[in-house]
Image (cartoon, rainbow, N blue to C red):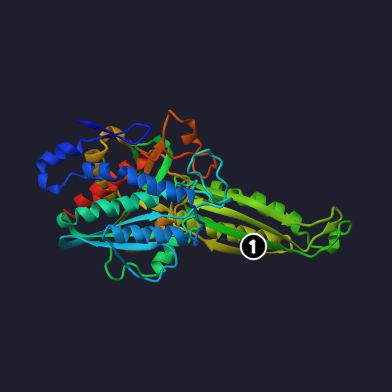
Amino acid sequence: GEVTNLGRGGSDYTASILATQEKEENMGDITALIKKYEADMIGIRRHIHENPELSNEEIRTTALIREKLEEYGIEILEIGLKTGVVGFLKGGKPGKTVAIREDIDALPMSEKTDLPYASSVDGVCHSCGHDIHATVLLFCARVLSELRDELNGNVMFLFQPAEERGTGARQLLDCKFYEPVKPDVLVGLHVSPEYPAGSIGLKEGPANASCDTFYIKVSGKGGHGAHPENCIDPIAISGYIMAQLQTVVSRENHPAYPAVMTIGSIHGGKAPNVIPDFVEMSGTLRSLNAESRETMQDAIERISVSCAEAMRGHAEVRWEKGMPPLVNDQNVIAGLRAAAEETIGADHVITVQNPSLGSEDFSFLFPLLAPGAQFRLGSGNDADPNTRHGLHNSKNVFDDSCIAAGTAVLVQYTRNFLK
Ligand code: NI
């Protein structure tokens, strides 16, 4: 097929879409539409990149998104979100509703690239690529708005705040964005520096882990380090708890389900000869399976409490239960694969083998609303090693030629779904 080069870095966006076009001439040429607006959209992305905002503080980003959606003729649903936006596009004929979701927040870290559009805000930067996500979604809105007459159904554009805090998806749910029209399917993407720009990665089934934080307070009875018989030593107890907790993944979890438990902090005592009153620990629990997640939560609680009790102490476990595992629906993945083959070409579609134990709060929306899937959007470029540092790395550069590829796949998926 014909190859169209979009942007720098040569993400060859194979235009096999052109072959499809011949079959369905009245469907409109999305390749042409994407090419027409690409430079402008990259400009928007670089503006967002230069002006990053933290979770729940995405004020200017929200204002920009609203302004652009209005310009593109997209209705904005006023549902009471402080930051973030929900846009709505009614197609030419009634039908189902596709919701496309992306996040818009930045991270509390300083950017260390020498890009001309590097973050202008000290201590805040888009090192997770959510500036690219927001731009892809705006780009989808712009293109789909022009194609609205051909759509049998509606499109919802979910610009979600506060993903990095893991609360944004729940904020969207709390605003009941699904009440006017409930989506029939949820799709979205996340950039991936490990794959080349112009390609996407698809993973069926579990793709990201659940994420729970636990806090354990071990109480004893403080006193003189020379008289442990008069004390209850929370430091000794905590040592045993920590060792026992290592059996949660190895002895309590089903070996077929990948899981991680990490204790990331432990604090107690100040002097070498004083037994303190208490010790505090905290950790993270990750799992790809809902059942195994619960088994391990119970085990952490039981082991901590019983271990402390056996040693005359007392342990309390407090949870901040975060997102469930992100499980990609197999039919949605098949639809995304078809859309990608029609647009960026089959040789730019990577089947992702391993799930990530990282988490993604998009997962809050799937089980409650509709089947869904998130795919990975390659943003790496072999010609520039700075594109390969990875997410949450202050030096990482995202090859923004990936924006066109991500938009093409999401637009084509939506067109196919609303045919
Ligand atoms: Ni992210």
Image position of 368 with respect to 347: above or below? below
> What amino acid does circle 1 point to?
Val
Is 243 on the left or on the right of 222, as rendered? left
Image position of 69 with respect to 41: above or below? below
Is 250 on the left or on the right of 139, as rendered? right
Seen from this angle, which residue lies furthest right?
A: 226
Observer able to see residue 372: yes
342 or 52, which lies in front? 52
Residue 81 x %, y %: 41, 68
The quadrant the N terminus occupies is: top left
The tally of labels here is 1
Q: Quadrant of residue 60?
A: bottom left
Q: Which residue is mark 1?
A: 305
Residue that appears at 52% across and 47% down: 119
364 or 343, which lies in front? 343
The residue carrying mark 1 has its beta carbon less than 8 Å from ligand 1 = no
Image position of 129 with respect to 164: above or below? above
Observer able to see residue 204: no
Q: Quadrant of residue 30?
A: top left
Residue that appears at 28% across and 57% down: 72
369 or 115, which lies in front? 115
Residue 120 x %, y %: 53, 49
295 or 410, which lies in front? 410
Seen from this angle, which residue lies furthest top?
A: 383
Residue 134 x %, y %: 39, 52
Residue 282 x %, y %: 63, 56
Is 297 on the left or on the right of 365, as rendered? right
* Residue density around tag 1, few if under 14, some if 14–19, many if 20 or more, within 10 Å: many
Q: Quadrant of residue 228?
A: bottom right
Residue that appears at 62% across and 58% down: 303
Residue that appears at 49% across and 40% down: 116
Which type of secondary structure does the marked residue at label 1 adopt? helix
